Amino acid sequence: MKLGTEYHGLSYDALTAHTAFVFLRYMFMSVSKRDDEDDRTIGELFYCMIDELADITFHHSLQILVEAMFESVKEIFQPTEEQTERFTNAFISRLPKYMQEALSPSLAV
C-alpha cells in the first residue's frame, strides 16, 4: 500500500493525511474484493428478495385465524345458518373495538 515509501514529508498533519488515504485505499480494495468473491453481495438481489417476503398485516392475520375457527366450528358442530350467524355475532361482539372494525366487513355471513 506504499505507506512507508510513497510519502517522505515531516509534517505531522501531512503524515496523518497520507495514512488516512492509505487506509481508504485498503478499504476500497477490501470492498472490491468482497464484491468479487462473496455471493451475498449480488447487487439488488437482496432487495428483490425482500419485496417477495412482505409482512402480513394485522387485518389479514386476524381474518385468517377467525375464518379457520369458523370453519372448524362448522365442521365439528355442523350448526344451521341461524346458529352460525348467532355465533358469529356473539363472537364479534366480545372482541375489542379495533378487532370488530377489522373483522366486520370480512365476516358478513
Image (tube, rainbow, N blue to C red):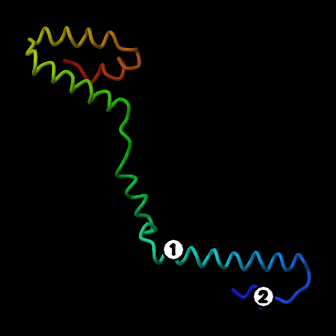
Quarter of the picture containing the N terminus is bottom right
Instruction: State the image quarter where residue 22 is shown.
Output: bottom right
The extreme right residue here reads: 11
- Circle 2 residue: 4
Indicate left or right for 60 with 70 as reference: right
Task: Give the number of callouts.
Answer: 2
- Is disc 2 in contact with disc 1, using a CB cutoff of under 8 Å? no
- The residue type indicated by label 1 comes to Arg
Q: Nearer the viewer, residue 99 or 34?
A: 34
Q: Residue at x 10, y 19 (%)?
A: 76
Q: What is the x, y in percent for residue 16?
A: 83, 75
Task: Tell me which numbered mark, 2 or 1, is placed earlier along the sequence.
Answer: 2
Q: Residue at x 59, y 79 (%)?
A: 29
Q: What is the x, y in percent for residue 50?
A: 40, 53
Residue 19 in the image: above or below residue 107: below
- How far is disc 2 from disc 1 in space, using C-alphas? 26 Å
Q: Residue at x 78, y 87 (%)?
A: 4
- The residue type indicated by label 2 comes to Gly
Residue 78 in the image: above or below residue 43: above
Describe the element under mark 2 as helix, strand or loop: loop
- Circle 1 residue: 34
Indicate left or right for 88 with 103 as reference: left
